[in-house]
Image: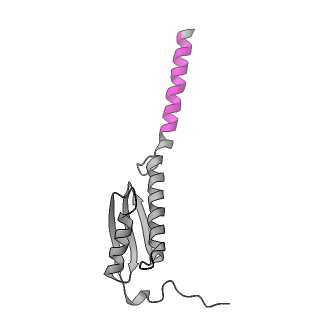
Amino acid sequence: MKTRTKYGFASVILLAVTLMAPLLTSGCGKTVGETIDDATITARVKTSLLNDPDVGGLRIDVDTFKGVVTLSGAVKSPAERDKAIALARKIGGVVDVKSTLQIVQEELEDFPPTIPPL
């Protein structure tokens, strides 16, 4: 009887581990902790960009994967691009910064567009 109970308990543990394993990793091969860390890094980088008056944070998208931050979107000048990259690099947990920022001068003069009062 004890042998049967021992194997029953081991089967339950094995089943629990098997069912829990997919929950501990997300679909893109990251653990839950890595996903949370990446979300935190993304939020901190975006906040830093929005708080800097020299950078148009609303025009820059931030994505993070395993600590590597990718900046994409449009900026007005090379100086703005360089400042955005420098701000991202200062954030704790950032392993590397990749940029696909496009320098577009004419189209960004009124971005975000101003909304007339009602």
Q: Does residue 101 show up?
A: no
Residue furthest out toward the top: 1
Residue furthest out toward the right: 118
Q: Residue at image x 55%, y 20%?
A: 9
**Where does the magenta region start and end?**
3-21
Which residue is at the front of the view, 20 or 4? 20
Query: Is 72 drawn above or below residue 104 in the view shown?
Result: above
Quarter location, residue 83: bottom left
- Of the 4 image quadrants, the one containing the N terminus is top right
Q: Does residue 11 show up?
A: yes
Q: Position of residue 105 (x, y in %)?
A: 37, 87
Q: Position of residue 106 (x, y in %)?
A: 39, 90
Q: Is residue 112 magenta?
A: no
Q: Position of residue 29 (x, y in %)?
A: 40, 48
Q: Residue at image x 41%, y 79%?
A: 54
Query: Is 49 drawn above or below residue 95 in the view shown?
Result: below
Q: How is the image coloured?
A: one colour
Q: Residue at image x 59%, y 88%?
A: 115
Which residue is at the front of the view, 92 or 7? 92
Q: Residue at image x 33%, y 57%?
A: 95
Query: Is 62 drawn above or below residue 4 in the view shown?
Result: below
The dominant secondary structure in magenta is: helix
- Of the 4 image quadrants, the one containing the C terminus is bottom right
Which residue is at the front of the view, 117 or 51? 51
Quarter location, residue 92: bottom left
Q: Position of residue 72 (x, y in %)?
A: 39, 71
The tally of labels here is: 0
